[in-house]
Amino acid sequence: MNVPPRLERLRRFVIDLTALLERQPEESVILNNGQGLLKQLIAHDDWLPSQFAEPHPDHYLQYLLYVDPQQRFSVVSFVWGPGQQTPVHDHRVWGMIGMLRGVELGQRFELQPDGTLQPQGDPLRLERGDVECVSPRIGDIHQVSNAFTDRVSISIHVYGGDIGAVKRAVYQADGQEKSFISGYSNGSPPDIWS
């Protein structure tokens, strides 16, 4: 396959993560080894096509970059306009979040025995090059925001499934869940390789 040189980094990441998943390791191995692969991808900010880095003035965007044909994983660019944030939400699959540009703040939440949500620790600040992991096993409920009120931030997310098709939930402060399926800001999978 003839891949444009700027996309070679993403292609290599997809190949290496596919090889890791074909060994069918435990989740802890996927996250441990996958973090290293994602750090290699986000160490360079020269590969993300501009159409997957465009912000929206009112809300964050979730651009699909790649989905595995067997839906074992998906790669997404999240583009945060100034001050934008998600609601409190979960993923229901493992995930890795790597900062490509700017800074993100992530606040984890934990469901209490009475069903309410409580913040878990201080917000985590992800700087360029940092990677954070989520999963139902290690903590899966959080709220994410752009740390900047005057510029765009972009993170690369990798999930253990086609995250745009996974039935997930947003949470109210009292713990009530509202189901949703996010889809993608750019619709169906793009052909970024050509």
Image (spheres, rainbow, N blue to C red):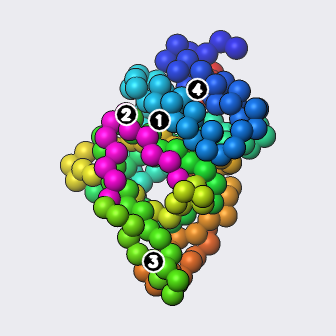
User: Disc 2 marks which amino acid?
Assistant: Gly
Residue wearing tag 2 = 129
Q: Is residue 86 left or right of residue 64?
A: left
Give yes or no for contact between labels 4 and 1 (Cβ–Cβ under 8 Å). no
Say which label, 3 or 4, has the lower sequence index. Answer: 4
Q: Residue at x 48, y 27 (%)?
A: 41
Residue wearing tag 3 = 117
Graded by Cα atoms within 10 Å as few (under 14), some (14 to 19) or many (20 or more), the crowding at tag 4 reads some
User: Disc 4 marks which amino acid?
Assistant: Phe
Residue wearing tag 4 = 13
Seen from the viewer's position, the closer of residues 175 and 6 is 175
Say which label, 1 or 2, has the lower sequence index. Answer: 1
Say which label, 2 or 3, has the lower sequence index. Answer: 3
Per the model, the C-alpha gap separating discs 2 and 3 is 30 Å
Quick one: SS at disc 3? strand
Q: Which residues are magenta?
A: 123-134
Graded by Cα atoms within 10 Å as few (under 14), some (14 to 19) or many (20 or more), the crowding at tag 1 reads few
User: Disc 1 marks which amino acid?
Assistant: Gln
